Structures are given as C-alpha cells and as structure tokens.
Image: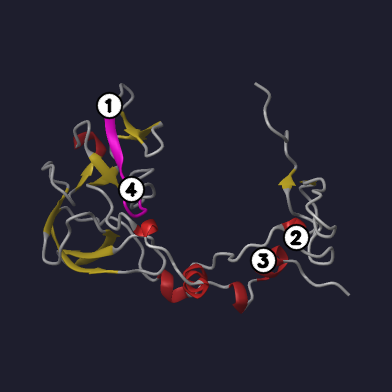
Amino acid sequence: MGKRIISQARGKGSLTYRVRKKAFQHRIGYPMHEGEAVIVKIFHSPAHYAPLVKAKIADEIFYNAAFEGAFEGQKINIGNSEIKLGNILSLKEIPSGTNIFNIENNPGDGGKMIRSSGSSATVNKPYDNGKIGIIMPNKKEIMVAGDCRATIGIVAGDGRKQKPFVKAGRKYYKMKARSKLWPRVSAVAVNAIDHPFGSGRGKRVKSKTVKRNAPPGRKVGHLRPRRTGRKKR
C-alpha cells in the first residue's frame, strides 16, 4: 500500500505542514490618519525577511518595513509632501529618482510590492493617464496609480543573504517558521511509490504534462501547459 506524496500531505493541512500563527501576527499596512507618527519599536518578525517598525499616530498603531537609518523615537510624516526617509506619501507627490518601498498596488491596500530586506524601487515619471512609472529592481518599469502610497527610502536588513546559515538545523527552523518546504528532494530521485516521476537508476525524466482535473496524487508537473521546452530563437 502506497503513501501520500508530499503535495498531498501539504494540502491536507496537518500539523507537520501548518505554519505557526504566531509568526504572522504582525501585518504591514498604512494608517488611515495623516500627520506625524512616532516609531515606537523596531523588532524582528519571523514571517518577514526585513525588520519591522511599530509606529503610532494619534490613537492608531501600524506596522511597516523598517528603512535604513530608522531608530526608535524617530518621527515620520504621513501625507506630508516633505521628501525624507521613512515618510509615507502618494506617488504623485514623490519626485523622479527617489528610492521607495512598500508600494501599494491599489490605493488603500497598505502596500504589496518591494518589502524584502535591502530592496527598493525608483520613481521614474508621471504619465498622462494619472499613473506613475516605477523602475523595479529587475530594471523593468511598471505603472501604478498616482494615489497609491509608498515609503521613501530603502528597506533595512541589506546583506541578509551574505551571512550563511552554517548549519542545516538553522535553515530548517527558518523555513518552518514560514511553512516552506525544505529540504526539497528532486522528484526523479525518490521511489516510484512516493512520486509519479520516481524510480529508475539515474535521472530519466518522464513526461511532466498533467491534466488540470487530475487527482492530487497525480497532479504534479506542468498543469495543462500550452507549450513546453525551450523556445527556438
């Protein structure tokens, strides 16, 4: 009798593959108020790759990714047109060439893009349709509504990848905090009973195409692909 493959076990939602709720107790977002806010605390969150800041404005508490140069007790402005590190402004009020992060995809969603440590995007130029061009870290330009907000600066924690994990145990607990699959074993390296691609001495790859309505144990590989293989130039 066979056993469930990993994709089946993860989909079941057992304790083995369930993320700790405590890790995701802090949610990044922008406040409803405008004015001056104070950074109350800078701390580490297991669910985020960058350190977070806890800020207070009026009677509202909000969390944001920390920026380079942030310190506890620092004052930041929200909705003010002053170009200063940590300030939160609408994209239409930010001049071209400014580094920004935690960019809203739609006005009011609290920020969805550029939140990883050491990352930032650059404001490019406004367009006639009211949208603002933004140069992403991969040098590609996207257009976002001018009413979307962003934080000025660069996300703190640059150089995080330069420090090695050294031990497999540290990597294991780091990935477990986010419910990530690690270590990942190649599908063709396992037994035939554990995966549809398994069995065989050596990596003799089978067909990776699969039907969209395939059962969970068979639904691995390319789901109803339009094409496979490398493109011929």
Q: Residue 150 occupies which quadrant of the picture? A: top left
Q: Amino acid at mark 3?
A: Gly
User: Do the residues bearing badges 4 and 2 touch, measured as CB atoms within 8 Å?
Assistant: no
Mark nearest the camera among 4 and 3 is: 4
Q: Nearer the viewer, mark 2 or mark 1?
A: 2
Q: Residue 26: x and y, percent? A: 35, 68
Task: Quote the CA–CA distance across marks 2 and 3.
Answer: 22 Å
Q: Residue 75 at x, y = what percent? A: 10, 59
List the residue tagged with mark 2: 189
Q: Which one is in front in this view, the residue at disc 2 or the one at disc 3?
A: 2
Comes first in the chain, label 4 or label 1: 4
**Residue 196 on the magenta segment:** no
Task: Name the amino acid, label 2.
Answer: Ala
Residue at far bottom of view: 15
User: Which contiguous range is marked in magenta?
Assistant: 115-125
Mark 3 falls on what kind of element?
helix
Instruction: Determine whether 230 is above or below 49 in the image.
Output: above
Spatial separation of the CA atoms under disc 4 and disc 3: 32 Å
Q: Could you tell me how many numbered marks the image carries?
A: 4
Residue 153 on image: x %, y % = 22, 47
Q: Nearer the viewer, residue 103 or 47?
A: 47
Label 3: which residue?
11
Mark 4 and mark 2 lie on one chain; the one further toward the N terminus is 4
Labelled pair 2, 3 in contact (Cβ < 8 Å)? no
